[in-house]
Each structure stands twice: as structure tokens, then as C-alpha cells.
Image (tube, rainbow, N blue to C red):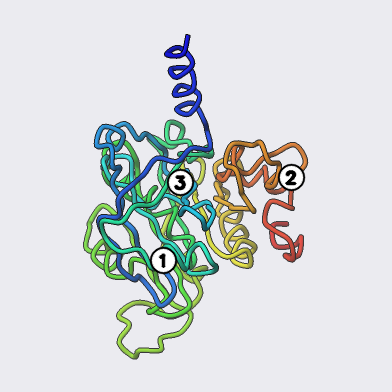
Amino acid sequence: MRKLCVVLEDREVQDNPYKPEMWRIVRRYPLTNDVNFFQARSVDVDQALRMNYLPGQFVMASVLGEGEAPFSISSTPSRPGLLEFCIQRVGTLTETLFSLKENQTVGLRGPYGNGFPIDKMEGKDILIVAGGLGAAPLRSLLLYVLDNRDRFGDIAYLHGARTPGEMLFREEFLQLKERDDLNCLLTVDKDDTGQWPERVGMVTDLFKELGGIDAKNTYAAVCGPPVMYKFVMQRLVKLDIPKHQILMTLERRMKCGVGKCGHCAIEYLYTCIDGPVFTYWDVLHMKELIGKGVSSDVIA
């Protein structure tokens, strides 16, 4: 009887959705002044290879004694074994994460959320529009479609940042511009270096350089600061892309990741389960998804 109890206790621990797995940081370096790039591999090698996720999903990262928070996955499932994240320094937990060195461990659980509907997007043209930190989750989608290039149509990536120094993965995207099978357009609001080789202006200015768009055959994915959505949505709707094919990845006060705490609930939706990827139709009917403090005309 005693042995049976021990087995049952072990099973309960393994089935605990709040129990993180330990992942080892194998690489960490700054992307900007307040954003670090993390690359991690599971302490359990088999677990690393079993980690299945979709572009657009997130994990809960934790440090013992400091708490946990949701972070978008920036890597692609087409390159298994490693997880990559962009983490901005904004509080106690992220301050602790910034202090971790390579070979130290962090707790991760997940993946959570719905991710991008890859099966529906296959065979379609893909238009990705990123602003600021929105490049973190959209990088996962971009790398996935590039790794599976023969399964998608034309691919365009539009990325805007305030300055060259604040553009996530700047050098990586500059290199991607050399690809013939990708239309990669980069811009900054202002060039504070005098050496920026690309465009200066708003990300919406890049739409003029897209050329012809087969709207009915296009899926658009957008992520960025809330104020960006109004102007990007206007451009996408003007292009006649169907509203159910305009996808927005949103994060809203997610705490547990499994729909139990109710912290991210908006009416009948839970961002951690029904999101963080929503269609434009979803957002039109639930404008609170964009976030508090943002005027409703941002998504009108």
C-alpha cells in the first residue's frame, strides 16, 4: 500500500499543469538596451525533442522565489531541440532573468495558446507586419514559413521600429533581405545613427512597396504596440484581405496559462486559451482585446 501511494503521488506531480520543466540557458545576449535574447535547451534531452508548439504560442517562464510570466516563443518548431525568447526588462522577474548566465536553468511550462492556423495558411500568400516587440512572436511564424517555403505562396515581411538600435533581430533581418523568395522591408521612425541603410518612416509607409496583392489568397499576421493596429488594420482592410484572414497576436495579463485563474478573461474568451492569436473579426466584436487605455477607434 505504501508503494502504491508513492506511485500515485509521483503521477500527481507529473500531471500537475503548474509544474515547470527545467531548461538550461545555452545562449544569451542583448538585442537592444532593454531586451535580451535567450536560447534554452531542456535539461531532459528527450523532453527538448518532444516539445511541440505552433508559431504564435507562448510559455510561462519562472525563477524560484521570483514568480513567473508569459513569454512568446521566438523560435520555430521546424528547428526542434531549442526554444528562443525575447525578454524585455520590465520588473523583478525579468531583472532576475537578465542576471542569469549561460548554463544556469529556468523553469518553463507550456506551450499555451492557440498559435497561428498553419494548416489554413498553407498554400496562401503570407504578409507579416511587425512593430517594436511584435517581432518576437512573428519571428517564429516568419522562420517557419521560410523553412517550409514550398508550402506557401509569396511572403512579405514588414518591420518597423522607433530607431535602428531598437529593432529586434536587426542584423538577422538585414541578411534576410538578400533572399530572392522573401520581400523583406524594414523601416525606422528616425535614424539616430546616420548609418541606417534602409527606409526612414512609419511601418505603414512600406505598404506602398508591396506591389500587387492577391487579397483573397493572403493571410496577414500583425503584432506591435496597440496604437499601431489602427493604421495597419486600415491598410489591410483597404487591400480587401478578408477579415478572418487578418490575424493579430495579443497578450493581455495572462497569469496561469491554462484558463483557471480568470485573469485574462474578456467576456467569454480567455486570452491564454482562445488567443493570443485572434482574427480581425474577433477584435471587432470584442474591442477590449486590444487593451485598456486605447481608444475604441483604434480597431474600428
Write down the quadrant of residue 230 in the picture. bottom right
Q: Name the residue under label 2.
A: 266
Earlier sequence position, callout 1 versus callout 3 = 1
Count of numbered tags: 3
Quick one: 91 or 112, which is closer to the camera?
A: 91
Q: Position of residue 106 (x, y in %)?
A: 39, 52
Between the C-alphas of marks 3 and 2, the distance is 34 Å
Of helix, strand and loop, which one carries label 2? strand
Question: In percent of the image, x 47 and y 43: which residue is there?
Answer: 57
Numbered tag placed on residue 49 in the rendering: none
Tell which tag, 1 or 2, sits nearer the viewer. Answer: 2
Q: Where is residue 296 in the image (x, y as percent from the top left)?
A: 76, 60
Type of amino acid under label 1: Glu
Q: Mark 1 points at which residue?
A: 209
Q: Which residue lies furthest to the front in this view?
A: 2
Earlier sequence position, callout 1 versus callout 2 = 1
Between the C-alphas of marks 1 and 2, the distance is 37 Å
Type of amino acid under label 3: Asp
Question: In percent of the image, x 60 and y 56: which residue is there?
Answer: 238
Q: Where is residue 48 in the image (x, y as percent from the top left)?
A: 29, 38
Earlier sequence position, callout 3 versus callout 2 = 3
Write down the quadrant of residue 35 in the picture. bottom left
Q: Name the residue under label 3.
A: 214
Binning the other alpha carbons within 10 Å of mark 2 as few (below 14), some (14 to 19) or many (20 upward) gives: some
